[in-house]
Amino acid sequence: QVQLEESGGGLVQPGGSLRLSCTASGSVSRFNIMGWFRQAPGKQLELVARISNAGDTEYASPVKGRFNISRENAVNSVSLQMNSLKPEDTGVYYCHLMLRLTQRDFWGQGTQVTVSS
């Protein structure tokens, strides 16, 4: 079993920055993909960004150039630096981990990000 613990999030004005962090514990294979999804009010869950253990990254189009995802394999952690935040970035952000060998995936409890003046 894998547990994901998130930190960060909160309220920020448009144009501001926030940093989300997530650390995985438990039976974490080093072959994994970690990332962040978000769900805005009344909308479906969507991918924000993800990064493989090899460092390959993928970003959703709305966040390209504004968000940066990084990870530290030694401690099974992933971070999302969010800059130039917009009101449409508001939502609950969930840390996600997928084990590449078994395709099993795990979710964090979610952290609220609110972008508002």
Image (cartoon, grey):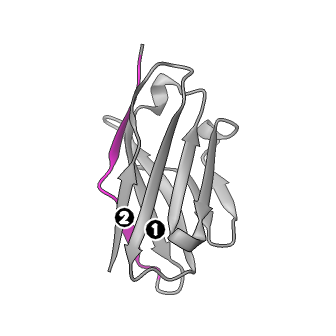
Please give the name of the residue rendered at 29% of the width and 55% of the height, measured from the top-left corner. 109
Q: Quadrant of residue 17?
A: top right
Residue where numbered disc 1 is placed: 97
Residue 95, given in percent of the width and then of the height, sits at: 42, 57
Position of 91 relative to 86 (above/below): below
- Left/right placement of residue 56 relative to residue 108 reads right
Viewer-proximal residue among 80 and 103:
80
Please give the name of the residue rendered at 41% of the width and 19% of the height, measured from the top-left corner. 116
- Left/right placement of residue 78 relative to residue 6 reads right
Please give the name of the residue rendered at 40% of the width and 38% of the height, measured from the top-left corner. 9
* Mark 1 secondary-structure assignment: strand
Which numbered disc flags the more N-terminal residue, 2 or 1? Answer: 2
Q: Which image quarter holds the N terminus?
A: bottom left
**Mark 1, other Cα within 10 Å: few <14 / some 14–19 / many ≥20:** many
Rendered image: mark on residue 4: 2
Residue 48, given in percent of the width and then of the height, sits at: 53, 48
Position of 33 relative to 82 (above/below): below
Residue 52, given in percent of the width and then of the height, sits at: 62, 68
Q: Which residues are magenta?
A: 103-116
- Left/right placement of residue 51 relative to residue 108 reads right
Q: CA distance from mark 2 to mark 1?
A: 8 Å
Say what amino acid the circle numbered 1 marks. Leu
Q: Are marks 2 and 1 in contact (CB under 8 Å)?
A: yes
